[in-house]
Amino acid sequence: MNTPLLIDGKAAATRVLQQVREDVASLYEQAIEPTLAVILVGNDPASQVYVRNKVLRAEEVGIRSLEHRLPSDTTTEHLLQLIDHLNADRSVHGVLLQLPLPAHIDELRALQAINPDKDVDGFHSDNVGGLSQGRAVLAPCTPSGCLYLLKQACVDLRGKHAVVIGRSNIVGKPMAALLLQADCSVTVLHSRSQDPQALCRQADIVIAAVGRPRLIDAGWLKPGAVVIDVGINRIDDNGRSRLVGDVDFDSALNRVAAITPVPGGVGPMTIAFLMKNTVTAALNQSQAQRSLSEAVCPSIS
Ligand code: NAD
């Protein structure tokens, strides 16, 4: 078999972010400053790192960011008030609520409170529903990044059998919807699937989003499959802490046509697509605003 292609997520994210910078510049020419509000409730260390990275990346591409850090004893009502305030603020185009939230907060209610036009994570049911209807909506960032990587790997998706392992609302389900939209035949595997290995071995494309270190080895893969590994798992490797994916990379390498590494595969794509969604939200809102003012006050010609 030919040497497998390593799908380079860092290089792909750089390309997406370059396009974002150009879009940001054209928004500034229209006197629009794209703005992302990020809400973090509590002190979860991993969430703090994610939020810091999102804010830094936003600054790098010229997107204004507003950080709202709330204490861990914040009530659902208080959080909803902040979301309402950000929804009403016309200078804010994207609202991101960092998950997970402290257990006492009603997560679904909070996510549903975000104006779907500002829902840059794509978790509001209007966007979830729109995605499954095949409408152009703000789609979740990680699966959008995976689809971009598949296209970059020059995979003709039409008619291919894609197996998505994992059915979370954040990755697995929206990934399946995007692959369906791209004309794949899609199978979704989960913790209750019977003989997942045999089902996975039928796949031309495998998307692994499980959260189990190196679960998927060569025995799960058809020769020539294209594999996108979403998993990010920290393991102890002879006293050294390191990140591995859900796919056993070394064993898979002898089998696949193309594969993403961990780290350096899907990871960088998530933030890149968050920036892309923020710019899309700003563009959509400015166009909606323009149409509204033209309808109320048509120009005299
Ligand atoms: P989750 O825990 O919400 O969902 C895991 C899914 O895996 C569940 O649907 C479960 O049914 C399924 N599953 C569990 N054991 C299984 C098994 N043995 N066989 C088949 N399916 C099984 O996780 P998530 O939020 O979807 O994240 C999955 C992984 O992706 C995690 O490692 C997470 O860190 C990573 N992740 C990475 C990014 C990124 O930016 N690269 C973004 C989100 C999540």
Image: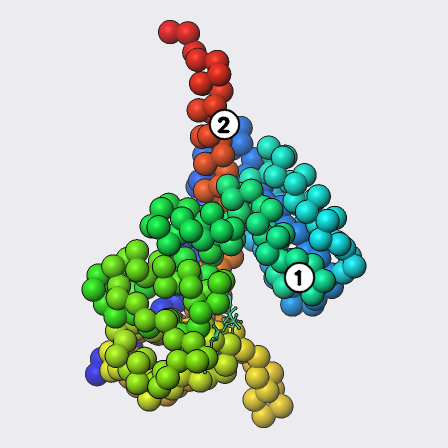
Q: For the residue with label 1, is its CB less than 8 Å from the closest atom of ligand 1?
A: no
Location of residue 144 (image quadrant): bottom left
Label 1, residues with CA under 10 Å away: few <14, some 14-19, many ≥20: some
**What is the three-letter code of the residue carrying label 2?**
Gln
- Asked which secondary structure carries label 1, the reply is loop
Count every numbered label the image shows and give the total: 2
Q: Is 149 located above or below residue 219 in the figure?
A: above
Q: For the residue with label 2, is its CB less than 8 Å from the closest atom of ligand 1?
A: no
**Residues at marks 1 and 2, CA–CA distance in whole angstroms:** 33 Å
Q: Work out whether residue 253 or residue 100 is closer to the camera in this orientation and state it.
A: 100
Q: Which residue is mark 1?
A: 101
**What is the three-letter code of the residue carrying label 1?**
Leu
Q: Which residue is mark 2?
A: 289
Residue at 33%, 89% in the rendered image: 219
Q: Earlier in the sequence, mark 1 or mark 2?
A: 1
Residue at 62%, 90% in the rendered image: 239
- Asked which secondary structure carries label 2, the reply is helix
Residue 194 percent coordinates (x, y):
37, 84
Residue at 68%, 56% in the rendered image: 40
Residue 22 percent coordinates (x, y):
44, 41
Residue 174 percent coordinates (x, y):
42, 60
Q: Of discs 1 and 2, which sits in the foreground?
A: 1
Q: Is 45 located above or below residue 113 in the figure?
A: below
Q: Residue furthest top?
A: 301
Marks 1 and 2 in Cβ contact (< 8 Å): no
Q: Work out whether residue 28 or residue 130 is closer to the camera in this orientation and state it.
A: 130
Quadrant holding the N terminus: bottom left
Location of residue 118 (image quadrant): top right
Residue 41 percent coordinates (x, y):
71, 57
Residue at 32%, 80% in the rendered image: 200
Q: Is residue 24 left or right of residue 165?
A: right
